[in-house]
Image: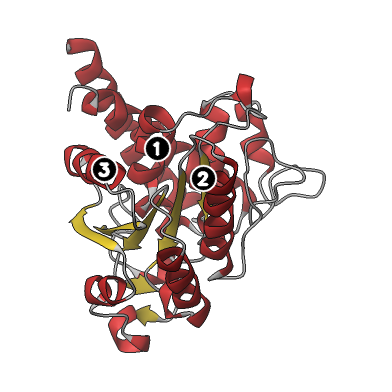
Amino acid sequence: MENQHILAERAAKLRYLVVKALHGAGSGHPGGSLSSADLVSYLYFYKMNASADRANDPDRDRFVMSKGHACPALYAALAMKGYFPEEELWQLRKFGGMLQGHPDMREIPGVDMSTGSLGQGISAACGIALAGKVDGRSYRTYSILGDGEIQEGQVWEAAMFAAHYKLGNLTAFVDYNGLQIDGDVHEVMSPAPIDKKFEAFGWHVQMIDGHDFNEIDKAVTAAEAVTDKPSVIICRTVKGKGVSFMENNATWHGKAPNAEQYAVAEAELAAAHDKALKEVECK
């Protein structure tokens, strides 16, 4: 994939902004925001037909962050794309700020659907995809779910709906980092085998490394070629990806770093971004 170095730089900056915003807020969800950062970066900086200057274009691609608590990753991408000033990120979760703890389509430019109650986002994405199909629109709908989120029964109602209406314009990603707020997803309420379950519901299924842009691109391209059924890409990821003490640590599902922890995280993420930027410049 020719653009993987650029995407790596975008993802590195996105992670930096996420952790900085969460530290400033003093609360939020770093683990799942960081694990999904590469998926969000791929969609917003490469794949999706969506931009701030065409925010109301009826043919723009749609994105639904079904696991709404991972909105810091979405907010960072929207700021980087120019939907609102980057400085707005420092008002995350603060009174008077625009950016709430979960996405709000009424208040935040670029947010296609308000989410927060787990399971409901993918249902909304199905409705958006069906509307596009009925209206003859060319847009595609993308959604990211958490592996803990798919313990919700509503997810499987949506899966049944999407297959029934042959929503070939819908691509869902499962951020399979293996951890949720209470620990290992397989110990809390195992969703496995995720691939077989989606297959049984009539979806086109792929499993990939969710941090490998080449694999992400190949999977999305394959999904686009399937027009008679919805597609799901199950992405193996690392909770807290990019911050050493957060990686594969469930305790970082829903808390912000203190000043000492932020200093370590900031240094690691800044170094990662500098390295990614140099690799882009070398190309």
277 relative to 127 in the view: left or right:
left
Mark 1 or 3: in front is: 3
Q: Quick one: SS at disc 3?
A: loop
Residue 178 percent across, percent down from the top left: 29, 71
Q: Residue furthest right?
A: 96
Give me the disc on residue 162.
Answer: none
Instruction: Please tell me whether residue 112 is drawn above or below residue 125 in the rendered image.
Output: above
Q: Position of residue 279 (x, y in %)?
A: 20, 20
Q: Residue at x 26, y 71 (%)?
A: 199
Q: In the image, is 239 to the left or to the right of 165? A: left
The dot on residue 225 is 3
- Of mark 2 and mark 3, the one earlier in the sequence is 2
Q: Is residue 255 visible?
A: no
Circle 2 is placed at which residue position?
63
Residue 253 to residue 17: above or below: below
- In the rendered structure, the answer to whether residue 189 lies left or right of residue 272 reads right
The mark lying in front, picked from 2 and 3, is 3
Look at mark 1 in the image and give the residue it sits on: 43
Q: Amino acid at mark 1?
A: Leu
Give the spatial CA distance, label 2 vs label 1. 9 Å
**Circles 2 and 1: CB distance less than 8 Å?**
yes
